[in-house]
Image (tube, rainbow, N blue to C red):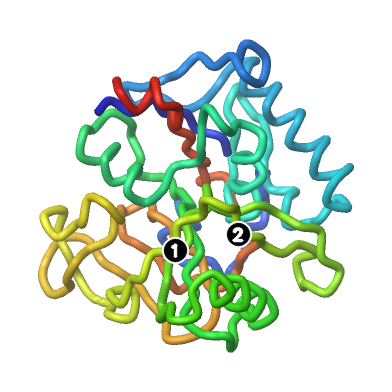
Amino acid sequence: MPIEKRFFGKRIEDIPSEMPEEMREPVQENVSNYNFLSNQSFLNGEPEKAVLDEYQGRASKDYGDASALKVLSYSDNLVEGSNPSAAVLVNQIVQPKLHVATQADLERILKSVSLALQGTYEDSGLVLRSEGEPNSYLARNLYTQIKERNPKQELPVIIPLAGLELSEDKNSNYGLSFTLKEDAEIIYAPILNKPGDFSNEDINEKTGLPERTGNGNRTLYTRDSGLSRLCLSRYLGLYSRDDGLADSNVNGRVVVVDGSAEGASR
């Protein structure tokens, strides 16, 4: 199934030192009329600038101009930056025809070599391992929502960013919290407690996660508690240990794929 891809993605001059090195070192008929770019291209051009303009307007109007959302910028015809909150807001703008890429989408893009992802990083989900630190306030909030849906749900789980919406939340360190959409996918993923190497052949196509670790030329990075972000790193490793949910730099990209029934059939 061909996937239509685009990059969204604030130029940050001082890259946070706590970000993993792989992320630190060196992409619409108006909003609804997209000119898709593929063949290893990054998002660029005026239609994408229209999306960014709406993004910035909503960040100010609906979310109190939260600093966690001040991470996308348009420079040299390219939209740069990414963190989970930014990706969720982009998703709210482009849905329902489009959605931000899940980890499974990113793995399909890698497999098809249809977009050059190496050298950038892409956020795809949140990983919940416990109600504790890091990000305990948001972790407890999401845990409560998950248990309301399924009291027997085990942890750890990954929640694709496409299944979340933002809420302004003065009690959160980020000024924001995450709300599960009605159709949110909650994926039980015990592999996210098992750091190690893996290969492309180990990837589960439905989840985009490795089914095992041990040998391979890619690495899964994990932690043992709290809430963290899941992202594909510039060396194509999987980071599920980063607790800096607001961190971003110019290497970040938000990938958007065609989520329509028509697009899914192509």
> Where 30 falls versus 244 (above or below)?
above
The three-letter code of the residue at mark 1 reads: Ile
Q: Is residue 24 left or right of residue 92?
A: left
Q: Mark 2 and 1 residues: CB-CB less than 8 Å, in contact?
A: yes
- Residue at 50% in and 41% down: 100
Q: Separation of disc 2 and disc 1 at Cα?
A: 9 Å
Residue toward you, 21 or 252: 252
Q: Which residue is mark 2?
A: 180
Q: Earlier in the sequence, mark 2 or mark 1?
A: 2
What SS does tag 1 mark? loop
Residue toward you, 108 or 17: 108
> Could you tell me residue 147's position as x and y percent?
55, 77
Q: Is residue 224 left or right of residue 247?
A: left
> Could you tell me residue 216's position as x and y percent?
12, 64
> Could you tell me residue 87's position as x and y percent?
59, 46
- Residue at 23% in and 33% down: 113
Q: Which residue is mark 1?
A: 186
For mark 2, does the 10 Å Cα neighbourhood hold few (<14), some (14 to 19), or many (20 or more) residues? many
